[in-house]
Image (cartoon, helix red, strand yellow):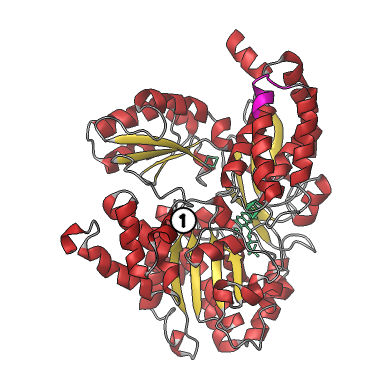
Amino acid sequence: MAEETLVVLKRREMSEPWSFQTFVDSGGYQAIRKAVTEMTPEEVIKLVQDSGLRGRGGAGMGTGLKWSLIPKDSPKARYVVCNGDEGEPGAFHDRELMETDPHALIEGMLCAAYAIGARHCFIYCRGEFILARDRLAKAIQEAYDNNYLGENIMGTTFSCDMVLHRGAGAYICGEETALLESLEGYRGMPRPRPPFPVTEGLYASPTVVNNVQSLQAAGQVILNGAEWYRRWGTEKSPGTLVCSVSGAVNNPRNVEVPLGTSVADVLELCGGVDDRGLKAFAPGGWSTPMLPPDKLDATMDYEGMVAAGSVLGASSIIAVPNDMCIVRAVWRGSKFYSHESCGKCTPCREGTYWVERILEDIEHGRADERDLERLEAVNNGMSGFKSLCALAEFAAGPVGSSIVHFREEYEEHIRLKACPHQMQAVAS
Amino acid sequence: MTDTRVLSEDFYTRAKQIVARYPVARSALIMLLHDAQDEVGYVDDDVIREVGSVLGLTPADVEGVATFYTMFKRRHPGKFLISLCTNMSCTINGADETAAALRDAVGPEHETTSDGVCSWESVECLATCHWAVAAQVNYLDIPYLTPDRATKLVSDLKAGRDLDEILSELRAAKSLQEAKSG
Ligand SMILES: Cc1cc2nc3c(=O)[nH]c(=O)nc-3n(C[C@H](O)[C@H](O)[C@H](O)COP(=O)(O)O)c2cc1C
Ligand code: SF4
Ligand code: FES
């Protein structure tokens, strides 16, 4: 039986883990002290690179590698931006991490700022997260009061300011270039890349955008060392990972496990699938291709999920129960993407619109065989990274994977000219 | 001049402080819109014009930004806005039934009850999927909003019960099962 391994969630069970006192009493602000007083910025970057820590926001880029890409010779200011806009359906770990351990986020950002030579840091906190906002605001104030933010931190020559910024309801702002647009006061539309944020990010200046969990983990790595972090996980995906688990499970919650833990073990840590039984699961949030129950031994790491036919994404398992109509589920998901598409790219704007329409027709018994073909054609037109950002890919994943694994459910809707689940509900 | 303004003097004082935090003033725009909406309840043409005046932006520019973000409401959503998550984990656990209960108790989505107290909207994943069916009232989190609890929530709000009290009652439930059995 798998066990939880609490690294970024280590303060979870402590009393008032968000308070300054609890934080410093349990090793808080020792990582930044060590970095600033014992290490050069290059050594900090090297250490994070050696740990193998990879970004937890979805793309899985090495955190140390990203920091190393900040140009050394740029005369411009550099910035650290935390992506706290968590909006992936099924994901709720960044929210818990910000609410329970806000100081650990501040410390991780300070480490990043020291490593890349940034004077200003921004936390982009999703607008709907009121408790996270309040806890972060208080923590930032406490950090200023105790000289962990501001001028000459801990009496050294290192100075750093931090601003708490709020989103206002737009999933697309979780995409890093849309987030930067939003942070600059514009509509949250992704930017073409290159240039990448590391060279031209916030205010066209070198910028590191990192996920909440990546930053908190980086702090732990700096304090405890690369070898320590590599005790967990796999060669290519070292360390621990917080997985959000919800849907048809008995005890839905966040669990932290070593990367490489199987989906079955993660589900078991959440009391197992409930008595409805498992029809399918999305391993990385709804935006990742769904898998059938015979893939429960797939492992929660970057390589393992690709091998199983999906991606790790936001490491958020949604268990879809047997009594859920797949067409209905995918249709509901499709509304999300057509609503959240920013509309900049034709394949995404048109694709998400038509996918939703066709799925609605199939679910309501208004479709024939040709519509299923059209659905596949439109969906294929959306995927393949033809657009500015990955949202089009996210939208295509659930549709394509559900047709692969549950084609007969689509065909049954077409044959019956109705949703079999709805018919059953009416009959009983 | 001052008496025709919809935003208070305090707003303008706070606005100065907020703008000062950013290296580029325009970055403060969303924070100013939040602050203004917290004060008057919505972001209408007057609010847009006044927020724009703080940053030297045209109303059209500010409106373009405000309408991109779903949290900014162009008209008053009522004293209490109930946001119900109908995304996947909540749908799996009964969000459709809760939506029906809210439709009965409040009326159609986005419409405010005649007493101006309540409106409701269906929203995307609130990142509290472990609390499915998840919801918020004025962005304060509510766990396990079953149809019965939703109906009671609306009648409590309409009866003028204290919001903190209502919330702590709702938050006492520790699982969906417990919430269902009342
Ligand atoms: C549509 C879309 C939504 C995203 N949402 C988030 C999010 O909510 N949080 C996050 O950290 N990354 C999100 N990302 C990934 C970010 O673009 C970016 O890769 C990440 O913040 C980088 O941090 P990391 O290197 O620490 O993982 C999203 C990407 C896309 C395309
Ligand atoms: S892929 Fe979609 S969401 Fe992303 S930039 Fe293009 S239109 Fe906008
Ligand atoms: S799906 Fe409802 S809160 Fe995440």
Position of residue A346 measured from the top left corner of the image (x, y, whole percent): 68, 49
Give the number of callouts. Answer: 1
- Can residue B173 be spotted in the picture? no
**Image: A391 above or below A143:** above
For the C terminus of chain B, which image quadrant?
A: top left
Q: Chain of mark 1?
A: B
* Image quadrant in which you'd find residue A150: bottom left
Q: Which residue is mark 1?
A: B64
What amino acid does circle 1 point to? Gly
Label 1: which secondary element = helix
- Can residue A263 be spotted in the picture? yes
In front: A399, or A3? A399
Position of residue A108 measured from the top left corner of the image (x, y, whole percent): 55, 71
Q: Residue furthest top?
A: A427
**Image: A15 above or below A43:** above
Q: Residue at x 22, y 35 (%)?
A: B160
In front: B46, or B73? B46
What stretch of residues is rendered in magenta? A360-367
Q: Is residue A159 left or right of residue B36?
A: right
Q: Is residue B140 magenta?
A: no
Q: Is residue A366 magenta?
A: yes
In front: A26, or B143? B143
Q: Residue at x 26, y 35 (%)?
A: B116
Q: Residue at x 42, y 49 (%)?
A: B71
* Image quadrant in which you'd find residue A420: top right
Label 1 neighbour load within 10 Å: few <14, some 14-19, many 20+: few
Q: Residue at x 81, y 45 (%)?
A: A309
Position of residue A337 measured from the top left corner of the image (x, y, whole percent): 62, 43
Position of residue A142 measured from the top left corner of the image (x, y, whole percent): 37, 72
**Image: A210 above or below B128:** below
